[in-house]
Every structure is written in C-alpha cells, then in structure tokens.
Image (cartoon, rainbow, N blue to C red):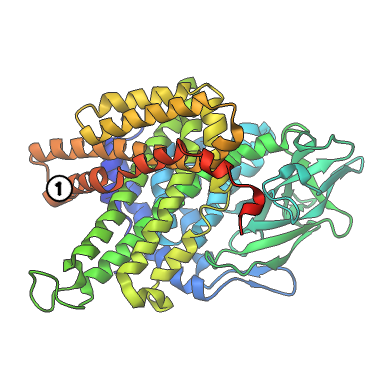
C-alpha cells in the first residue's frame, strides 16, 4: 500500500475546527489537497526507503549528488508552484493561506521527510525576505524561491557554537566594495545538492569592530553562484561543501559542512541592518520550529499507516474470541497501540492546523494572536516531537521482530523521527522558552486566557474540567515560585508537556462534538466520523491522565535541585 496522504483527516480539521477563510471554499480545498496528495504519494513516497539506503554522495569537486529520482521529484513539485504555496502572488507565489501550506507540508514530510527538508528551508527564506528584504531583494529572490529554481539554507551552527550563538567566529569584512565572509558552518541542511540552479545561504557572521555577543552578529545573503556581466548567475562564489554528515536518520538529506572564504572571501550581501542578524534568523527559526512540530505529526501519520497495514495482514497467534487465521489487528494490545497512534496523531494535526490559522491572523497584525502564536510555538515543537518518538516506536512494536529488521521500513521512521526533539532548538530550549518567556514574562496572562478559553469550551467534559483546574493550580505554583529560576528550569519540560496534552484534549473534544453533529445530520462516511469519536474518547481516558502526572512533577521540582553535580554517580 505505501504512504497515502490523509486527505479526509486534513479536511475534517480545516472544515470543522478552523473559521472559514474568504479565499477558501470546499471545492478549492479539495482540489489543492488532492493534487498535492497525488504528488506526495506518487513521487515522494516511493523514494523514501530508497533514499535511506542510497545516500547523497560528495564528489571530489565538492558538488553533491542526491539519490536517484530526487532531482526529478523536486522539479515536479517546483513546477506546480508548491514551494510558494503561501507566498505573495506578486512574486509568483500561490498566495494561499498558511493553513493550506501547513496541510500540504504534512503530505511532503509524511511521504519523504528527507526530501521535504529542502523546501522547508526554502520556505523559511521566503518568510525572511518577505519580512526583512528590500523591494529589490524581494524581486530578485522570491520568484526564484517560489519557482524552485533557487533553494535556500540557514547557516547558524559552528563547531564551537551550537545553542550559544554569541560565540560565532565567522567574520565579515568590507573591502570597500563588497562584504567578504570567512568561516565554517556545520549541520547545514541541503547546503549543497543538485536539485536547483542556485543555492542561497543565509549566514550569521560577525562584522569588523562589532561588539561581542549577539549584538555584533549580522545576517548575510551568500549565493552559490553570483551574477555575471550578462545578468546570469554563473560565477562561482568562494564557498564549498567540504563534507556531508553520516547520520542516524534523515539519511537522504545532505547535511553539509560549509566552508566560506578559503581564498579571497565569499561575497555576501547584508540582509537588513547590521547587528540584527539573530533577530532576522529567528524569523526563520520561529517558522522552522512550527515546521519541525509538523514533521513530528507527519512522520507519526506515516508510521501509523505502515503499522495498520502490517496489522491487517500479519497472522500470528489466534486473537481471543476470533477465528484461526485472523490477522494480529484482532489482538487487544495491537488495537491499543494502533488507537494510541491514531489519537496522538489526530491531536497533533489539530494543533498544527488550528495554530496555522492563529498565525495567519497574527501575521495580519492581530496582537492577541501574536501572543497566542508565541505561546503555542514551543508546545508545537516540543510536545509534537516528543509524541513522534512514542508513535514511531509503537509502530515498530506492532511489527514485532520484523520491525527491527530494516527491510520493513518501520525502523526508518523511528530513526528519522529522532532528530526532531534536537534540531531547531532542543526540547529543553523549547521548555525553558515556554516557562520563562511565554509564561513568566507576562505574569501568566496569556496562559490564563488560554485556560479560560479551554474551560468554557469543555464545560461538558468532566475529564477535561478536572485537568483544567489542575493546570490553573500548577500555573499559580509556577508564578508563586518565579524567583526560583533553577527549580523552574528543572521542571519546565513537564510544564510544557502537561500543557501540550491539555491543549490536545481540548482540540480532540471539539472534534468529537463536530463528528457527533455530522452523524446526527446523517452525513456520509459514518465509519470515519465514528472513528473520530472513538479517538477522542481514547484520548480522554488513556492519554489525558498524563496531564496530572506532568503537573504533579512540576510541583515536586525541588527534588532535582537537591542533587549536586557530583551526585550523578
């Protein structure tokens, strides 16, 4: 069977949990999702396992060959305009709402996460140029990104500088005519490849005489190819890929070590104002953290589908009260695992798509939605990627011993998913962001407003009401202990996860009410709607109790602080 884009699940969320958009009707949604799904299913999914076994190759001329079929698949995606789904139509983008980009990106990443990383980074550059670029830069770069002719990367990390970007050593010097950049960057996703005509690198570097720390860092646009006298991009810039990493997962995506300025210096163009590089990169980082959460949901769906297919065909033992020859889906614990995978994935999908609509309003200037977006981003990234570890592991478990064998492909999903809690800011960083910047900075105002919104909409759900009251008490505890930063840092992860499960329960409850309403109206596809109700019930009774566990840990955080560094023996 392979991967199939979950069109019906997407449409259920878009049509039932989000307010309508003036540019979207059911016909448009159906047409866009259907076409995107075909591309994902027919071009990307067949390359997923192949790319895992046939990794990119770095040639002696420092060019990178991606796995066979990747370049052709990229051209099919690009020529349909799918990279610029939510980009401004004035620059050859589709101009669709962000919710549609999020929905489509699920299909790309579910079908082939290694492949989809290239367009994910390019979409981040589209955001950065749209918000910070000059009119001339927008005219130059955005149409090229939207058409897929050019792709983009984000260059932050250096061998000595991971999370602490203040320690960046890459230098930018002005020679009177151009900025010349010299330095080395690591972990550059699609830093070199053969799928586009040009690669545009956004690079953090420290300018001459700039102050120490993050205030001395600027962002530079460094193309692989520079413009020649005829206006064509044919002049090779002074940069090259010197190696590609050998990784646990996402093996088909070239993760490059990039060297800038081994000779006269790579020519770069400063993006925006000097000294605001970190600020600009966080435009991309915010988008990237949302997208990494989306990746967690997407790969969970892919793992779920593979596990369901296997459970429907594998015969092993005779399930209780079933006939001999019944597949393993008849076993009680296999049902539990499958329903857990579906319930968690549906909660993640609802969070991603509902949040994408909030982001639409935030980007249109709605101040309340800007606060909501900021509050949700660390949950989207942190909670969803942690769940992806559980869901992909459960998928492997359903396969039994065959899951441990690479040929089935179940292990690949688990390996690919493992990067998600790490990159674009580890989940510890997300948890601290959620605790200190998104809760304490406004004295819990946004958190309290969110809890009140959830409380009103879940008054008829006793399980949710109990957990909302617990969340409110936990929030009070955090605010009362705001001066004990060390203690709060020890329990910030559980604080974030508790809120994640609570928000997931809220959205599953809303979906359940909509499914019941549609059933009462004799809507088509009764089995699908009933499955939504069962998933929501499962979440209430099997998943939601985790809120209590996490929030109880929050109030006992002092236990960790009692340990001295030499206690870990």
Q: Nearer the viewer, residue 382 or 240?
A: 382
Mark 1 Cα shell of 10 Å, populated few (<14), some (14-19), many (≥20): some
Q: Is residue 158 visible?
A: yes
Q: Would residue 385 appear left or right of 523 to someone viewing this image? A: right
Q: Residue at x 85, y 60 (%)?
A: 262
| x then y, percent, for residue 450 | 39, 26
Q: Residue at x 80, y 50 (%)?
A: 229
| x then y, percent, for residue 428 | 56, 45
| x then y, percent, for residue 360 | 45, 31
Picture mark count: 1
Q: Nearer the viewer, residue 42 or 161?
A: 161
Q: Is residue 99 visible?
A: no
- Element class at badge 1: helix
Q: Nearer the viewer, residue 183 or 497?
A: 497
Q: Residue extending furthest right?
A: 176
| x then y, percent, for residue 158 | 73, 53
| On-image quarter of the C terminus | bottom right
Q: Residue at x 45, y 62 (%)?
A: 112
Looking at the rendering, which quadrant does residue 215 occupy?
A: top right
Determine whether 437 is above or below 326 in the image.
Answer: above
Q: Would residue 106 appear left or right of 454 to someone viewing this image? A: right
Determine whether 497 is above or below 264 in the image.
Answer: above
Looking at the rendering, which quadrant does residue 300 occupy?
A: bottom left
Q: Would residue 538 appear left or right of 392 to someone viewing this image? A: left
Q: Would residue 499 appear left or right of 564 to someone viewing this image? A: left
| Residue on which disc 1 sits | 530
| On-image quarter of the N terminus | bottom left
């Amino acid at each position: 069977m392979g991967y199939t884009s979950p069109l019906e699940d997407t449409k259920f969320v878009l049509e039932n949990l989000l307010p309508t958009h003036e540019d979207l009707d059911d016909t448009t949604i159906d047409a866009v999702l259907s076409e995107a799904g075909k591309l994902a299913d027919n071009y990307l999914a067949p390359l997923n396992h192949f790319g895992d076994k046939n990794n990119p190759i770095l040639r002696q001329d420092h060019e990178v060959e991606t796995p066979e079929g990747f370049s052709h698949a990229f051209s099919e995606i690009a020529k349909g305009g799918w990279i610029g789904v939510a980009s401004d139509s004035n620059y050859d983008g589709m101009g669709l709402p962000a919710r549609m980009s999020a929905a489509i990106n699920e299909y790309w990443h579910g079908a082939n996460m290694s492949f989809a990383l290239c367009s994910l980074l390019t979409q981040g550059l589209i955001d950065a140029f749209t918000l910070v670029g000059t009119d001339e830069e927008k005219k130059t770069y955005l149409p090229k990104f939207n058409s897929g002719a050019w792709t983009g990367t984000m260059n932050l990390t250096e061998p000595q500088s991971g999370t602490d970007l203040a320690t960046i050593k890459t230098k930018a010097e002005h020679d009177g005519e151009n900025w010349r950049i010299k330095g080395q960057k690591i972990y550059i996703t699609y830093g070199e490849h053969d799928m586009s005509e040009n690669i545009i690198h956004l690079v953090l570097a420290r300018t001459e005489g700039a102050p120490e720390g993050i205030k001395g860092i600027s962002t530079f646009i460094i193309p692989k190819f520079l413009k020649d006298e005829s206006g064509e991009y044919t002049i090779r810039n002074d940069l090259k890929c010197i190696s590609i990493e050998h990784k646990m997962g996402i093996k088909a995506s070239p993760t490059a070590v990039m060297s800038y300025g081994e000779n006269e210096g790579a020519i770069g163009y400063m993006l925006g104002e000097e000294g605001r590089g970190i600020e600009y990169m966080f435009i991309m980082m915010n988008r990237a953290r949302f997208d990494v959460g989306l990746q967690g949901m997407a790969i969970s769906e892919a793992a779920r589908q593979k596990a369901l297919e296997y459970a429907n065909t594998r015969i092993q033992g005779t399930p209780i009260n079933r006939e001999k020859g019944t597949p393993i889906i008849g076993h009680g614990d296999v049902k539990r695992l499958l329903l857990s995978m579906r319930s968690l994935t549906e909660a993640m999908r609802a969070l991603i798509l509902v949040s994408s609509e909030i982001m639409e309003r935030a980007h249109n200037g709605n101040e309340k939605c800007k606060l909501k977006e900021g509050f949700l981003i660390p949950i989207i990234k942190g909670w969803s990627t942690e769940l992806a570890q559980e869901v992909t592991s459960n998928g492997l478990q359903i396969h039994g011993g065959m899951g441990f064998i690479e040929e089935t492909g179940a292990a690949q999903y688990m390996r690919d998913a493992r990067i998600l809690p790490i990159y674009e800011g580890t989940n510890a960083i997300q948890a601290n962001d959620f605790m200190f910047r998104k809760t304490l900075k406004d004295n819990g105002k946004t958190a309290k407003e969110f809890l009140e919104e959830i409380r009103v909409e879940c008054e008829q759900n006793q399980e949710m009401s109990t957990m909302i009251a617990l969340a409110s008490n936990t929030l009070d505890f955090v605010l009362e202990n705001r001066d004990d930063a060390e203690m709060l840092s020890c329990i910030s992860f559980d604080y974030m996860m508790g809120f994640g499960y609570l928000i997931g329960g809220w959205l599953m409850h809303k979906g359940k009410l909509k499914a019941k309403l549609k059933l009462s109206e004799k809507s088509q596809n009764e089995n699908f709607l009933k499955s939504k109700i069962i998933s929501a019930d499962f979440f209430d009774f099997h998943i939601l109790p985790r809120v209590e566990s996490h929030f109880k840990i929050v109030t006992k955080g002092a236990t960790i602080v009692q340990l001295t560094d030499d206690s870990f023996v």
